[in-house]
Amino acid sequence: MNEELYELLQDNIWAKSNPYKPLWLHLLETGIVAQSLLELGSFRPLAKELQRYLLLTEEQVYQWVGYMASVHDIGKAFPAFQQQGAETKIPALLKEHGLLCPNPDGFRHEAYGEEKLYQIWKKQGLFGNLRERHRLAAVIGRHHQGKKTAVVSNGFGSKDKREEIWTRLQVELEKQMREVFCPENVLPKHYDAVCMMLLGVVVVADWIASGEEFSHLPPLRSKQQVIDDTQKIMQKFLERNHLLHHAPNWEIDSFTKLWPNISAVDMRPLQRTVEKIFADEQEMPLGVILEAPMGCGKTEAGLYVACRLAQRWGKEGFYVALPTAATANQMVERMNAMLARLNDPQAKLMHSMAWLHTDSEHNVQTEDAGEAELWTSPMKRGLISPFAVGTIDQVMMATMRVKYGCLRLAGLAQKVLIIDELHSYDAYMSSIIEKLLSWCRVLHIPVVMLSATLPASSKEKFARCYAYEEGHMDSGIYPAVTLLYDDKVSRQVAVAGSMPEMNVGIDCQPLLGHPDKVADFVVQKTKNGGCLCVLLNTVKEAQDTYRIIREKLPDYPAMLFHARFHAKRRQEIERECLAKLGTDKGKRPSKLIVVATQVVEQSLDLDFDYMISALCPMDLLLQRMGRLWRHKNTLRPKGMTEPHMTILVPEKEDYGNTGYVYYELLLQRTREELKNHTSINLPQDIPTLVQRVYEGAPTTELQLEAWMSYIMDKEVKAGAAGVQELPSPMADKFCLYDDEDELFSDDETDFLPAKTRLGEASIRIAIIPQEEFQKLPKNGRVRREKAKEILSWSVSVSANKLKLENKTCYGGTQPWKGDGLLRGLFVLPGNNGRCGFDDGSWIKLNDEYGLVMKNARGESL
């Protein structure tokens, strides 16, 4: 090959073809973008973690990461990729000189680049031995996730001159990047930690450098001009997207500095306890569990602990993880009020419908444009923004086999993680949370966990993710603050001081599964007025009970609240509930019935005069009690002298639909325990009741059988989660390289509930008018504003109950499948919210009842 041809190729090989961008330029820009993310952006805390594991100075970390990011696309220097650029000079040049790749199909430039980098580093004597080089090169091979990683044969022989010219180009590109960034020849002390953080930075840097900000810059510039231009662009990009490094100006050394509206005199015992613990500046736990009853100021205490841990571990924000979208919606307002006082950026909201909130967008020109668009949308951007509030599933995905889980881990590494309602997750989800905690430990992500009713066995499992000695936990200490460390045994601190007590009267009625009888009972209880909650365990039971109550009490104000309303209507109901039953007494009605499912069970600050609840496990039943007489100085109905809850139990041992929602053993044990009580004292009885239901040994043969079934089911669920989880972090391995299992494809989108629960799979649907449906484009893509409009009318539904793959709408119309921003959404044509199917079944979205589904026989689903 002559030198003239080599120079022609060197000058023309491309990274982006329309508009044209030279490969060297994209590599250099990506490296500088990565440096800017660490030095100027919200990824700054990752630089501190990388210092810890690479034993480098801060400046050396920027150089090392910049180099690794800059060589990410070196595999594009090969004809199998280059001949795709029809808009460039390269295809004709390759054809003229016989350099076309004979077999380009299936070629993956990142997988090819991984192998070529290994060979270059080996020749240069860089980055350790065979295994060590392969692990670092694997970061490059996985920056486009979910793609086949097998390197397709290049079609040239090992001694073919055509191979030599490309190897020379690759070596030259790597040399240019190494001369710019001057990386230290070091190896990580912990491969999983370093490689996962590095991968997250490389992916984000590649997406940003592939964005419109960099698409129209002139290619003919010196390297120094490129560096200067890129740094200027990144400064503006980070400012515009609220991603600038923002070391919190938290001069917080007392609880009242964070919460000035709570005086020292008014602080609750839990709040005083955490303030005393963290007055010791040397106190640096990585995990903190706050166990205390409902309504005792846990949220404020948890955020105070998070602030103190952020100061000490060099973190720049929080992620507050909650069980439901409704609780996240309420929490984000409280968080933002706190952040406004601190002059910090406002928190992003992250859950399945948070995308509906307006925000700026970033257009990306890369093969992963779809994922990049979703990740830079408001919902997922929260993971790489300093502050976010969202559902627990968004962070659980960080340790599951999904695309770009590395971004979730890298985003969390900037923050303190706060997990609320820790008790509320089943065995499947708890297994994933345990794995998440193990990764948080190696990445030094402090975690604050809150619960009122955490079983001792669950607490011990979470504690084992840190330094722990068997049998070290004392379940008799309650309320308690448990401190979990990376390098020393955990300790428990009892909360000193008395807490307000509330005696809740209880009675059990054998009405479970009988909506008509429940409605009759409600009629009796409304004679003196008041705000009542009827809390049921399934949407169908709630809809049926509400309908009968409306028939029997047409003039008594009532509302239905469950998860199967379309997004827009659910937000309206949520706001109405909080307005009428929240802390503002001026808006509280004298009469109201709320028929609801578990959406009101946790974290929502609602106050009912009386509650009728379907039987559920004891810890959740106690949570429901926390919505009774919650606020002081609320005017109660005449004759109502104490809080009271009626619990709906089965006539015999048939738990009906409730038995499909909760373990029957826990239902049986809860029911047996309730027989011994006419009242429950909160908080005094909480730990005893929870332990008796969850920890007590079986006493009869029937109980033993149920107990074994319960334990086996939990193990099966934990095992099922384990199949989908990443391996536990290892110091001498990179799990995405050393693990033989393929990563699962990540089908979750901004608009689907996360696939972390073992229960029924769900899909999201929207019913729109027939005339609007006919205008939808065949490719499944619509503009952003139209996507928001459609999503506001969407609802999540069981995939088993609505099997759309087997259904055709009336008139032979097939459901429309969304793509792009609407990926995973099914849109159906309807009249007044009703869509019928050719098998005689139908569904309807109703503002009062939510989604109503009937099968061909007219039976409700």
Image (tube, rainbow, N blue to C red):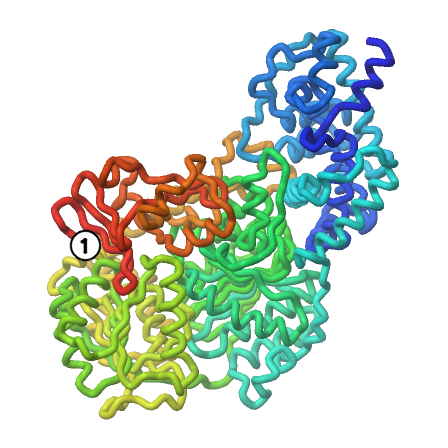
Can residue 488 be seen in this snapshot? Answer: no
Picture residue at 82% right of the left edge, 18% below the top: 8
* Residue 655 place in picture, x, y as percent: 18, 58
Q: Amino acid at mark 1?
A: Glu
Vertical side of 360 occupied by 855: above or below? above
* Residue 350 place in picture, x, y as percent: 51, 57
Looking at the rendered image, the quarter that the N terminus falls into is: top right
Residue projecting furthest to the bottom:
638
Give the left or right position of residue 382, taking residue 605 as reference.
right
**145 or 217: which is nearer to us?**
217
Q: How many marks?
A: 1
* Residue 107 place in picture, x, y as percent: 60, 21
Give the left or right position of residue 514, taking residue 306 as reference.
left
Question: Which residue position holds label 1?
Answer: 701
Local SS, label 1: helix
* Residue 599 place in picture, x, y as percent: 35, 64
